Image (cartoon, rainbow, N blue to C red):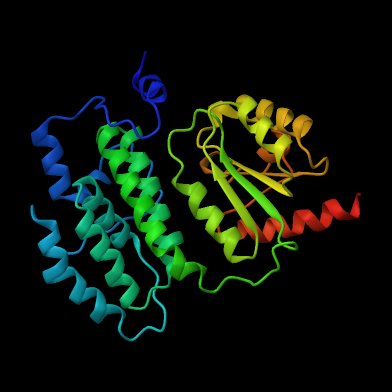
Amino acid sequence: MDRRDRAAALPEGDTALLQRPSPTAFEARIHSPAAWLDRPGLARPLAVPPPPAGFSARLSEAVAAAVIPRLQLAHAAAAESVPNAADVTALSALLLRHDAAGASAYLEALHHAGTSAEHLFLDLLAPAARLLGQFWADDVCDFATVTLGMMQLRRMQRDFAPRFLAGSRPRLAAEAPRALIVSVPGEQHVFGLDLVADFFRRAGWQADVSPLRSADELASMVRRESYAVVGLSLGDTDRMDALAATIRKLRRASRNRSVGVMVGGPAFIGHPGYVALVGADATAADARQAPLQAERLLRVLAQHD
């Protein structure tokens, strides 16, 4: 059984260590976050410059004493700023050191410097989650470290959700379409599901989120409740067959015979043609686009009823 199989066998949130790097090598990477991204063969989702100065062994103090004032000065003149690759690297370093206080302080500093909750979600938290996943896939750090980092990301996202939802589109409950956002059975992390659900809620949808243990569990959910759209997230293209089988099962079981099925996640980035292959109706480039595409899908489905 290889490392990925062992990880898949763990329950959600399990913190058992798998293939822990040597303490010396791990500490060296923590002290120099940019070094992770210089490793040969690393597929880089971002072109990451060196992190801000001040990231020493005591990162919380560095954030409070050096990084936060610089962020405030750098973004003071901008009406709205967008996190950059260095911000993603810095936050990831804090998460991998289990520095929850420092990570939260960094997030708050960006927000007070003019970064909206939307940009924090899309341009900081989501890329940081992808980067943590990349570190795990590339054996830079162990499963427990990534799991704990993802848990902290989810806590920060939930803490910011009220500020993000403050601009929600008002709709009567009876008029709000319902969406179910799930991961394909067997997926390890569900951070992106909460993010997508919040964008649906801000657009006036009722959105339910659930990790799945099996396709049968999803079939029971859509048989019990009527959803206008079901969105499924997939991280790896080698599980396309499982996704296609899950979609077929949910369509057969759905209480809403005209249910729209959307797919997303890393497996579909840059591959819109995969949507039809798995039997879905639509995809979206990111969480911001998901409710927009869902609204378009509902209009198309209504024309064919």
- Tally of numbered tags: 0
Q: Quadrant of residue 36?
A: top left
Above/below status of 19 relative to 191: above
Q: Is residue 24 visible?
A: yes
Residue at x 26%, y 40% (from the top left corner): 39
Q: Nearer the viewer, residue 169 or 72?
A: 169
Q: Nearer the viewer, residue 9 or 81?
A: 9
Which percent across, then down, holds residue 78?
Answer: 37, 83
Above/below status of 83 relative to 188: below
Q: Quadrant of residue 75?
A: bottom left
Above/below status of 90 relative to 130: below
Residue at x 16%, y 46% (from the top left corner): 30
Residue at x 66%, y 29% (from the top left corner): 246
Which percent across, then down, holds residue 231?
Answer: 63, 44
Residue at x 27%, y 61% (from the top left corner): 104
Which percent across, then down, holds residue 277?
Answer: 71, 33
Q: Nearer the viewer, residue 18 or 273?
A: 18
| In the image, farthest residue toward the bottom | 77
Q: Is residue 50 visible?
A: no
> What quarter of the picture does the N terminus occupy?
top left
Above/below status of 228 relative to 74: above
